[in-house]
Image (cartoon, rainbow, N blue to C red):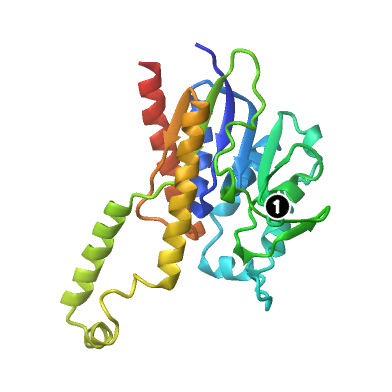
Amino acid sequence: MSKDVALVLSSGGARGLAHIGAIQELEAQGYRITSVAGCSMGALIAGVYATGKLDTFREWMKTVNKKKMLELTDFSLSINHLVKGNRIIEAIMEFVPDVPIEELPIPYCAVATDWNTGREVVFRKGSLFGAIRASISLPSFFEPVRRDGMILIDGGVTNPIPMNRVVRHAGDILVGIDVSGRDYETQADIQDELAEKRKQSKSLSRQIINKLIPDNLDFNYYTVLSRVSTMMIRQNSLLMAELVKPDVLVDIQISRYGGFDYDKSEKLINIGRQKTKHVLNKYHN
């Protein structure tokens, strides 16, 4: 059985931190990652891995709490985005070098989407962080990247798990780590359980809040649009898996943590490692 891996990491916001655990489990089981491709958060983790700084990045993520998340958020007054997105990139570049992609020790690529044409854009050369910044440009949240006449937004819009873009070597196995899915049923059960606990609270302040806040507060314009977007991305990732048929697909559907839970890095990393271990054990058998 080949131990060489062409690895592909999906989009998924903070859930993409599970990719770190997946990589660590692959290496712990003796696999050698010979090429890597990613989209959005997957492009970031893949790029950090390709520079050899994944362990440093994991340690840095342990310092990210809600206060630090706020400090790293450079809000914008623009009508088409909420956050400029430069501050977080600059913070990571303090310990991860911005090198030309073609000089990385293993082949790397990231994908973004051109707003003007609706087409996928694949980065295989040039600035590593230039490619990452374009790939993570979540529409309406991060400022789009303008380059060569294009307006670049998140690659998840067109190719959330770019298994058709990763460099393949003879005899390697294609491994995809997909964190784009959500376990909505379990998530709903958790929310119902929390809502019931709030209702049973004897705290006067909590009772007042319960009367003021409607039960269906979680069902609003933002959550509807967010879920519709996530569902469409998810379907695209499932379609890619059907078209390319990876040798190993680790499908990590997370219910408890969302796309902005960057302060939960260790929990997400552990989920990624345990899920990958389970899938690899089945693959070996």
Quadrant of image for the C terminus: top left
Mark 1, residue position: 117
x and y percentages locating residue 35 in the rendered image: 65, 28
x and y percentages locating residue 190 in the rendered image: 26, 59
Q: Which of 90/283 is in front?
A: 283
Q: Is residue 51 positioned above or below 216 on the image?
A: above
Q: Residue at x 67, y 47 (%)?
A: 119
Residue 64 appears left or right of 268: right
Neighbours of disc 1 within 10 Å: few (<14), some (14-19), many (20+): few
x and y percentages locating residue 171 in the rendered image: 59, 13
Residue 231 appears left or right of 103: left
Question: In this view of the protein, can residue 179 be seen by the observer?
Answer: no
Q: Is residue 211 positioned above or below 278 on the image?
A: below
Residue 117 appears left or right of 240: right
Quadrant in the rendering for residue 50: top right
Q: Residue at x 40, y 17 (%)?
A: 284
Q: Which of 242/93 is in front?
A: 242
x and y percentages locating residue 234 in the rendered image: 45, 46
Residue 140 appears left or right of 249: right
Q: In the rendered picture of this protein, how many numbered marks are placed on residues? A: 1
Question: In this view of the protein, can residue 268 be seen by the observer?
Answer: yes
Element type at marker 1? Answer: loop
Q: Residue at x 67, y 26 (%)?
A: 167
Please name the amino acid that badge 1 sits on: Thr
Q: Residue at x 38, y 72 (%)?
A: 220
